[in-house]
Every structure is written in structure tokens, then in C-alpha cells.
Image (spheres, rainbow, N blue to C red):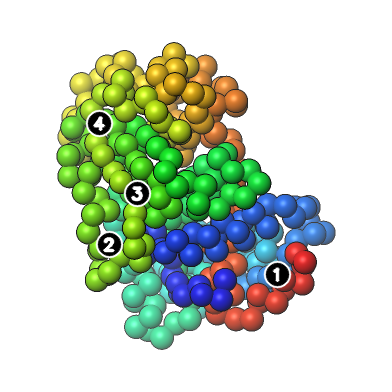
């Protein structure tokens, strides 16, 4: 944990294997703690976490708020519809209002790529101490989702020791709307960093060929990849070719709100070609977990029967894992700023 050096958390492209290990290890420790009010951890006592979600959210926002409260932080949440944004206030000015009220961590979601990064840069140049945690920006990145997916898979493959090595050599199939998915991008960085081989599957309109090169270059803005050797990425157009040999399958929501043109000829056809069902999954040749970041289009990305089958479908498990993962992120950011590490050590040992 002492090697943690990320002030802001904007993109998993910047994470090394040690960073993933630090987050998973902490999440596992937080997970095993009782969660009722009286047993909250004091790590963020007296600190203010603001959740600034300029785009709708069910899971991510409440999960961050719960995580912050379990670490005893004060939480302020912002809602665009009832704010001065409707009077024309800019995102930066809105954020600075919360910083002026004492917010030290801003969890930011925005429909445009790069807004959390821009905010972090603006706060840095204004000399503010507040840090930014990306809660999902445009098509670009959703770090906490990528990490909770990693945690879910690591726990599935190695329940006794759910660390990055649990993913080494595993074949993980990502299906569907990769093009519009920030979750897919964050998973590509996380899974390949942990040595998994990723198979991407979808039609060309939702999965351009160029995705096979996604992790081939150093991440944007960095001269060197923080991960010396990543797992592979390949593109398959047909599920029948992608599924055999899979160790896990993740299917992604059709991001209708991000589609700028008529990319699909119809949901029925999409379901026929890329929808997951119990029958289809038998192509994997072994029982595999199915992940989906939610919200699910029932009957489109997967059948209702599969969604309701907890022996395969990990959606609720992903939601459960989101809280300790976000506690770990908030904790690491705060600990990097102060000596609150001592608080955790004294509670958990
Ligand atoms: N909830 C995830 C996100 O915010 C996935 C989705 O919306 O499909 O990106």
C-alpha cells in the first residue's frame, strides 16, 4: 500500500499490477468486516466526499455513497436537475462550490469523455487539495466498475486468495456493445494487466477491428505501459467461435443513449446473434460465470432465465463487490493524503 501513488483515479490504463493487488487486497479486508453502523471504520471521519453525477446512475452513485459512509465520511450528493447547472453554472464551478464547502474527494460522472480529467487538472492548477475519482466518463473509462469486475472474477476463480494472479491465463469473453462501453475499456486494461486473454465478440458496428490493438500501445498520455507484459486481445465476430474454452463471459449493455446512428438492425436480431442463454453457454464446454455491469436490457443481452439464475449470473455479486472496492479506492486516496492508514491497521488487525 505504501507504493500507492495515484492522487486522482481517472483511468485504469495507469494502473500497475501492484496497484490492482493493493485494491483487491484492501477490498477483501473491507469485505470481511461487519457493516452495521456501530462498526463503521473511522478512516475518513471528518472528511467530505461529494458525488457529482452529471449523468444518471443507480448502482455506482449509491455504492460510492455507502462506501464513503462505511468509512465514516460525510457525504454530499449533487443532482443536476435540482442544481444551478440548469441556470448555466459550469461543471468546474459546480465542483469548486463543493470544494469550497470542504469536499476532499469528488466522485464525478459525466456523459462527455475527459471531464473528470479536466476537473482534476483545473483543481491542480488552482492549488486545491481535492482529488477526483472518475465515476464514469463518456465512452472512455469506468475504473471502479473495472475493479469490481476484477474482484468478482478473482473471487470466483480463487476464493481463498482472490488476487490478480487468479486471472493469469484465463480466457474472458466480452460480448456486445464494446464500442460505446467505458466498462469494456476499463476491463480491457484490468484483465490484460492481470494476464487474462480477452476475446471480444460483437458485430463490426459495435466492435471495430481496431479493438484488437487496444492495449498494444502504451496507454494514452504515458510513454511506458505500467504493466510490462499484458494478456492478449482478439476479436471474434461469432459467439459460436468466441465461447468454446471460455472461463468467464461478460456481456455489455447496448448503450442506446450513446449511439449516434442506427447501428443495429433490431434488438431481436441482436439477441439472436449475441444474446446469452443457458443453451448458448453450453458452448463454453464448462460452467462459467456471466457478468454484466447493469442496467440489463432483459431479453436482449441475455435471457430473463439466465439473469435470474444466480448460479451463473453474477450481476448481484458484482453489486455486492462494488462497495468494498469503492471503500478501498476512497481509502487509498485518503491515505495517500494523510496518515489515516493507521486507522485501518488498528481496526482490522
Ligand atoms: N452502469 C455502467 C456505466 O455506467 C454500464 C452501463 O450503463 O451499461 O457505464
The answer to whether 111 appears left or right of 128 in the picture is left
The residue beneath circle 4 is 236
The label nearer to you, 3 versus 4, is 3
The residue beneath circle 2 is 219
Q: Residue furthest bottom?
A: 127
Residue 280 visible (yes or no): yes
**Residue at 56% over, 22% down:** 308
Please tell me the numbered disc located at residue 344: 1
Expressed as whole percent of the image width and height from the top left, the position of residue 66 reads 63, 54
Disc 2 to disc 3, C-alpha distance: 15 Å
Residue 148 visible (yes or no): no
The label nearer to you, 2 versus 3, is 3
Disc 2 to disc 1, C-alpha distance: 32 Å
Residues at marks 2 and 3 touching, judged by CB atoms closer than 8 Å = no
Disc 1 to disc 4, C-alpha distance: 45 Å
Expressed as whole percent of the image width and height from the top left, the position of residue 89 reads 36, 66
The answer to whether 177 appears left or right of 37 in the picture is left
Is disc 1 placed on a helix, strand or loop? helix
Please tell me the numbered disc located at residue 231: 3
* Quarter residue 199 falls in: top left
Disc 3 to disc 4, C-alpha distance: 16 Å
The label nearer to you, 1 versus 4, is 4
The answer to whether 246 appears left or right of 78 in the picture is left
Disc 1 to disc 3, C-alpha distance: 33 Å
Q: Residues within 10 Å of mark 2 (few under 14, many from 20)?
A: some
Is disc 3 placed on a helix, strand or loop? loop
Which mark is first along the chain, 4 or 3?
A: 3
Amino acid at each position: 500500500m505504501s507504493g500507492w501513488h495515484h492522487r486522482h483515479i481517472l483511468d485504469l490504463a495507469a494502473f500497475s499490477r501492484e496497484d490492482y493487488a493493493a485494491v483487491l487486497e484492501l477490498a477483501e479486508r473491507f469485505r470481511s468486516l461487519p457493516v452495521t453502523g456501530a462498526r463503521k471504520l473511522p478512516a475518513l471521519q471528518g472528511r467530505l466526499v461529494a458525488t457529482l453525477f452529471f449523468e444518471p446512475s443507480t448502482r455506482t452513485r449509491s455504492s460510492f455513497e455507502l462506501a464513503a459512509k462505511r468509512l465514516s465520511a460525510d457525504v454530499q450528493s449533487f443532482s443536476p436537475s435540482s442544481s444551478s447547472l440548469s441556470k448555466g453554472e459550469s461543471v468546474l464551478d459546480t465542483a469548486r462550490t463543493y470544494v469550497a464547502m470542504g469536499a476532499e474527494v469528488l466522485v464525478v460522472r459525466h456523459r462527455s469523455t475527459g471531464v473528470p480529467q479536466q476537473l482534476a487538472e483545473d483543481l491542480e492548477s488552482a492549488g486545491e487539495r481535492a482529488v477526483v475519482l472518475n465515476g464514469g466518463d463518456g465512452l472512455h473509462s469506468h475504473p471502479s466498475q473495472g475493479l469490481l469486475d476484477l474482484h468478482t472474477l478473482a473471487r470466483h476463480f480463487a476464493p481463498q486468495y482472490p488476487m490478480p494472479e487468479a486471472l493469469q491465463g484465463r480466457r474472458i469473453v466480452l460480448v456486445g456493445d464494446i464500442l460505446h462501453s467505458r466498462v469494456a475499456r476499463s476491463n480491457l486494461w484490468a484483465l490484460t494487466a492481470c494476464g487474462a486473454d480477452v476475446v471480444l465478440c460483437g458485430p463490426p458496428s459495435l466492435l471495430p477491428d481496431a479493438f484488437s490493438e487496444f492495449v498494444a500501445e502504451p496507454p494514452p498520455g504515458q510513454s511506458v505501459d505500467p504493466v510490462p507484459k499484458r494478456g492478449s486481445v482478439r476479436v471474434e465476430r461469432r459467439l459460436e467461435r468466441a465461447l468454446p474454452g471460455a472461463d468467464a463471459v461478460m456481456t455489455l449493455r447496448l448503450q442506446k443513449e450513446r449511439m449516434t446512428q442506427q447501428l443495429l438492425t433490431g434488438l431481436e436480431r441482436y439477441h439472436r446473434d449475441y444474446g446469452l442463454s443457458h443453451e448458448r453457454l453450453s458452448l463454453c464446454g464448462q460452467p462459467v460465470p456471466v457478468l454484466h455491469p447493469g442496467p440489463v436490457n432483459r431479453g436482449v443481452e441475455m435471457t430473463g432465465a439466465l439473469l435470474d439464475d444466480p448460479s451463473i449470473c453474477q450481476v448481484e455479486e458484482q453489486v455486492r463487490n462494488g462497495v468494498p472496492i469503492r471503500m478501498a479506492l476512497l481509502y487509498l486516496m485518503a491515505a495517500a493524503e494523510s496518515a489515516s492508514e493507521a486507522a485501518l491497521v488498528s481496526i482490522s488487525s
